[in-house]
Structure formats: structure tokens, C-alpha cells
Image: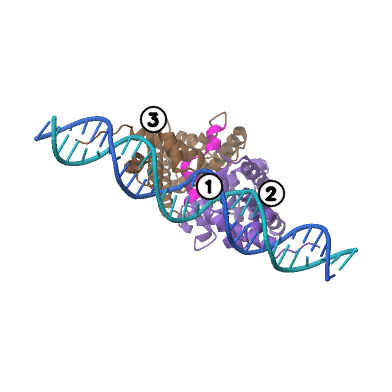
Chain colours: A purple, B brown, C blue, D cyan
DNA sequence: CGAGTTCTGGCCTGGCCGGTCAAGAACCCG
DNA sequence: CGGGTTCTTGACCGGCCAGGCCAGAACTCG
């Protein structure tokens, strides 16, 4: 019996995600959110709550989507080690460098907010842990497939790989060229995963 | 003949640095800066210019101090490879984890602002380049000292080490425990620098 | 077609935003 | 001790901030 919504919740979340991603949390005003979503103030607050609530929702959905994508890639990739390579090379795979400059919403948000917003820090831990878990599985598979030394601690390698990728993302944000970025990725890969068949 | 300043410029810059470091750029108001510095508005604007100007000055001095410290450590450390180890372990060396949570002012600022403030991005490139240069020198020295494979590309290793450290800093900001952080550092070090004598 | 429920747009508020400026104080030099 | 210069204080500006609120619209179901 109620009046139905005139907007699609998912596309609003996506539009708002773009805005937070580009400007950061504090630099994005609620008016910005209204502009990009096309909503009125009442609708936004009614559907999502405060600015902080919208942001947490955006961040959670972003992380969930990333983790899901990573899992799907792991299932579809020919060898476990390929996922790891893809993961580390990802940030430098855009030839224009635009997406490298943009960085990762989670990494940006953590750097900006983790100290003052405990829930952002907790969400970051949750998501990075999920990522490390998928990477660990990929590396264990790579060990079974003979691409990684079976005696190594897969979880430790996974964490080192995650750190390297985060570092590459951070460097990419400086506007450093994608070729230089790619060479960092290759250097890290070559040393973190010294497989026999490179 | 002029009236002399009543404040010490350096200690004002330091107090303001703490504030920007803890809260980020956008979340820090000019009133915050006045409060922590004890200055009146006119004095602050007269001495430093706009909020943006103060911030850039703080950031530059922070980076310069870090690069200078790294150089000094390179000069005083027994072996080149020790500097690299120190550098990667740094973020996890505070047992309480407080400084790990705080992260690095440059990394935080780059993540928050690089896209919307080109001068921040440029300053980040400059500083990371300086860091990579010192690391390269340390690794070249380590090659001469027999701690690193002399056939390797020192600059490439340096960049991979820098990326790993940046990643560890990023992970530290999530509030992840220092012991886990230290194990990431050791995993990265053990694989990036497989010296014969570990 | 009326009652009940939710959604929508935007007005309103109190306060904080970054930044300017004027008036007077503190100092040095002549 | 007076003139010149810079520094300090704090009032003030227009505008934007996040969020509250409300009047009315859109819909479903009885």
C-alpha cells in the first residue's frame, strides 16, 4: 500500500560510490551526494540514514564485490599462480594510468579515516583478511601444481603479496607512470614467486 | 624595525603536523590549527598563507626530515642490507601499535588528496623517488658487501622493497596486530632479500 | 473511492567553514 | 622619542555544512 520508490537503490549506491572514490569522505558533501544521485534530501536520509551510514554501505558493497570477483577469478583461472600474478599486476594494467591514479576505494578510505572511524578500520581488516584468504588458497593450489615451493608458508606468502599489491596501489596514486608501476609489479612478483618456469 | 614574532615557526609547524596527521586534511579545520598552534587567525595567515599552503609546507618538511633520517641511517649502519631491513620492519617496530595505526603522513595524504591536488601527488613522487634512491644505494652497497646477488637490478629491488613497506604501512593502519604486521615484514624480507646468511 | 502508508522535494536552522581586514601593540632605528 | 614596519587580536563575511522536518504526492488495498 505504500508509495513505491522512484529510484533504484543499487544505482544510487554506485553513483555515490564514484563520488566518494574521487573526492574522499570528508571532501564530499551531502549536497554532492544529492547531485550525483538525483535524490532529494528526504529520500536519501530516509533510505540510507546519515552520510556516515551511506558511506559504510558503499564501502562494504565495494569490498564484497571485490572479494567476490577475486573468488570467481580463482575458480576460472588455469593455474593458482595466475591469480596471484593478475592480482599484483592489476594496478598497472590500465594503460592510461587513470585507474591507477584513482587507486582503491578501500585503501583510500582506510588511509583517510581508519584512525578516526573504528568501523572503517574494522571493515578494512575484514576485507583484507578475506583477500589474504583467497590468495592463500591460490598459493596452496600453486604449491600443488608445482609453481610454488611446497615447503613455504602459503599464508605468509599471501600476506607479502597483499602488502606488495597495496604498495603498488599507493605508488600508483602518486601519478607515477604505468610502465614504472608495472616494473615494480614484476620485480615484486619475480622475487616473491621465484617459480622454476619463469 | 618591525615587531618581532611571538611564536617559533618550527614548533607551530610541528604542532600543526600532528593535527593533520591525526585527522587528515579535509577533516582538520582552520580553527583546529589555531587551537593547536595557539596563534590568532591573522598570525597564521600572515605567516603561512592559506590552509593549503600550511599543509604543503608541513608535508614537505615531513618528507625532507624522513629522507634526511634515512640518509643518516645509511651512513651509520654497519651493512647496507641493515638499512633495508630496518626500513621494512619500521612500521611494526612499535610494540603498542599506536604509530602503526597512525601510519605515515605522506601515505595518508597521498591517498586522501593526490587525485584532487596535483601538488600533493608531485610532492609524493618526489619524496618516494628520493626514498627509492637511498634504498638503491643501500642495496648496491649490500651487493658489494656480498649480502645481495650482484647480478640483480638494485633499483628494481629498491622499488619492490618500497612497495612492500608502503603495503605494510597500509595494513598497519587497519589496526591489525603488530605481531601479524611483523610477520608480513619478515615474509617480504625473506623473499625479497634471500641472502645466504639469514 | 477513501484510508493508510511511504516516498519526495525542498525549506529551514544553527553552526561551522576558510578567509579578510582593521585597529592597535611591539619593536628597531634614527 | 617619533616614525616606520611588522605582528597580533578578534570581529566579521558570505557561504556552505549536515541534518531535521513537513506538506503534499503516489501508491495499494479494502
Q: Marks 3 and 2: which is nearer the front?
A: 2
* Label number found at residue A63: none
Q: Is residue B108 magenta?
A: yes
Above or below: residue B196 compared with residue A102: above
* Image spot of residue A152 (x, y percent): 65, 41
How would you classify the magenta stretch by its main secondary structure? helix
Query: Which of the pair A21/B183 is nearer the observer?
Result: A21
Query: Which callout, 1 or 2, points at the residue further toward the start of the chain?
Result: 2
Quadrant of the drawing holding the N terminus of chain B: top left
Q: Chain of mark 2?
A: A
Q: Report the Cα–Cα distance between label 3 and label 1.
A: 27 Å
Disc 1 with disc 2 on a shared chain: yes
**Mark 3, residue position:** B76
Q: In whole angstroms, how far apart are the C-alphas of marks 3 and 2?
A: 42 Å
Q: Quadrant of the C terminus of chain B?
A: top right
- Residue topped by disc 1: A167
Which percent across, then down, holds residue A29?
Answer: 54, 53
Check disc 2: other Cα within 10 Å, few if <14, some if 14-19, many if 20+: many
- Sort mark 3 into few (<14), some (14-19) or many (20+) by Cα contacts within 10 Å: few
The stretch of residues the image draws in magenta is B97-113
Amino acid at each position: 500500500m505504500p508509495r513505491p520508490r522512484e529510484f533504484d537503490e543499487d544505482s544510487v549506491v554506485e553513483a555515490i560510490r564514484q563520488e566518494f572514490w574521487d573526492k574522499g569522505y570528508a571532501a564530499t558533501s551531502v549536497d554532492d551526494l544529492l547531485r550525483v544521485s538525483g535524490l532529494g534530501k528526504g529520500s536519501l536520509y530516509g533510505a540510507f540514514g546519515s552520510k556516515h551510514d551511506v558511506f559504510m554501505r558503499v564501502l562494504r558493497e565495494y569490498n564484497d564485490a571485490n572479494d567476490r570477483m577475486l573468488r570467481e577469478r580463482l575458480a576460472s583461472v588455469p593455474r593458482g599462480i595466475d591469480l596471484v600474478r593478475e592480482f599484483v599486476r592489476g594496478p598497472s594494467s590500465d594503460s592510461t594510468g587513470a585507474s591507477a591514479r584513482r587507486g582503491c576505494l578501500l585503501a583510500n578510505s582506510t588511509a583517510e579515516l581508519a584512525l578516526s572511524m573504528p568501523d572503517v578500520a574494522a571493515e578494512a581488516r575484514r576485507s583484507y583478511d578475506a583477500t589474504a584468504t583467497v590468495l592463500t588458497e591460490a598459493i596452496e593450489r600453486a604449491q600443488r601444481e608445482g609453481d610454488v615451493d611446497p615447503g613455504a608458508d602459503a599464508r605468509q606468502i599471501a600476506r607479502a603479496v597483499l602488502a606488495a599489491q597495496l604498495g603498488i596501489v599507493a605508488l600508483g596514486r602518486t601519478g607515477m607512470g604505468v610502465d614504472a608501476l608495472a616494473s615494480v609489479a614484476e620485480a615484486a612478483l619475480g622475487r616473491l614467486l621465484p617459480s622454476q618456469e619463469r
